[in-house]
Amino acid sequence: MATTPETPVPASTYPIERGCPFEPSEQLARLRGTGPVSARLPSGQYAWLVARHADVRAVLGDGNRFSADRGHPAFPRPFAEAPTQPIRPLSLISMDGAAHTAARRLVVGEFTVRRAEAMRPRIQQIVDDRIDAMLAADHPVDLVSMLSLPVPSLVICELLGVPYADHHFFQQRSGMLLRRDIGGAERSTAMDELMSYLDTLVTGKERDPGDDLIGRQIVRRRATGRYARDELVSLAALLLIAGHETTANMISLGTLALIEHPAEATALRADPARIPLAVEEMLRYFTIVDSVTARVTTEEVEIGGQRIGPGEGVVAVGLLADHDPAAFDRPDELDLDRGARHHVAFGFGPHQCLGQNLARAELAAVFDTVLRRLPGLRLAGAVDELPYKDDASIYGIYQMPVEW
């Protein structure tokens, strides 16, 4: 939003550095439970930070007055430099209303609870293979490169029909797109290269669709008369990026939580039926995705007692919402028995994460296997010396050396 006489002096800047993942920074703690405040973004824009749990759900649940259109000039950008050329908006996350509903309906069947359950044996095999590789390696090993990234990357590659042999290519481009310190030209190049790669992949599947998500989407969309290659390429990019980056970071942070809370880990090992509760609490506690949950108003609205004019940017800060004492008792305490599912780690409303059932299945498999097969797992260093992703749109850890 533009700075005008009606715009209050910004009370904050955004994004907000988290610091140690087990201790909220002073700025985060100060903003919790407050109404919307104006903040300056790296792009030079001003946007409203919405922090209360109820307010965040109100914003994300209202697809009429809060638009997800990333092409809107007032849409909040967490990057200092704009791309050198317009980046095609990714499918689904940039759509509103009936267009979004129709596009989501075409693919939502791929991510049902039943589908995720059917994939559990293969997910378990992938996890066991990665743990085998860790056990065969010399200590210490990097948990991120040996477990956190390979597990969701292999799963999403098999689901989509993307060759895992190309994982270094798409992981590097995805990482560049999520880094806030990457220049606009580099960001555009990374997106162009990723989209070109996927365009070639989809083009090949048009001739021989195969039994994978992209192939099934080609068949289904042709049958409904609404096949468009660009739309499917954009969908594939969204699913590929989100399908491995988010879960990978949650694996690293969740495993760190088990290491740093040994009594909780021992209790889970003795009663693995509690692991799904632990997964929900880790999702809430870390809430790794913030800056992608942004919107732009389509009309004047009032949120948390604050009037916000039309065409103004709003950032729904999920981390603050999931640490709101009005919504969660003792929100800064990691309670692996809490099991609260009203968190917004997967978003809320019409754009709630498509892959949440798959992510839950992967996280449960990883944590159960780590507890069983690596009972002595520990950091090969200090927790406050780990390289946290404070410079990225999705929070996590770049490297995590461990031994056992």
Image (cartoon, rainbow, N blue to C red):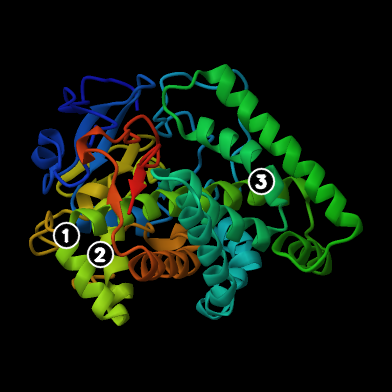
Q: Is residue 383 left or right of residue 200?
A: left
Q: What element does badge 1 sit on?
A: loop
In front of the other: 270 or 38: 270
Q: What element does badge 2 sit on?
A: helix
Q: Is residue 206 above or below residue 1?
A: below
Give the Cα distance between marks 2 and 1: 7 Å
Quadrant (top left, top right, bottom left, bottom right) of the C terminus: bottom left
Q: Is residue 281 above or below residue 72?
A: below
Q: Is residue 311 left or right of residue 101?
A: left
Q: Is residue 335 visible?
A: no
- Residue at the extreme right of the image, as rendered: 207
Give the Cα distance between marks 1 and 3: 37 Å
Q: Amino acid at mark 3?
A: Ser
Q: Which residue is mark 1?
A: 334
Q: Amino acid at mark 2?
A: Glu
In front of the other: 278 or 377: 377
Q: Earlier in the sequence, mark 1 or mark 3?
A: 3
Q: Which residue is mark 3?
A: 234
Residue placed at 29% from the left, 36% from the top? 386
Give the Cα distance between marks 3 and 2: 32 Å
Which label lies toward us, 1 or 3? 1
Q: Is residue 90 left or right of residue 374?
A: right
Q: Is residue 80 visible?
A: yes
Q: Which residue is mark 2?
A: 281
Residue placed at 41% from the left, 68% from the top? 369
Quadrant (top left, top right, bottom left, bottom right) of the N terminus: top left
Residue placed at 8% from the left, 38% from the top? 30
Which label lies toward us, 3 or 2? 2
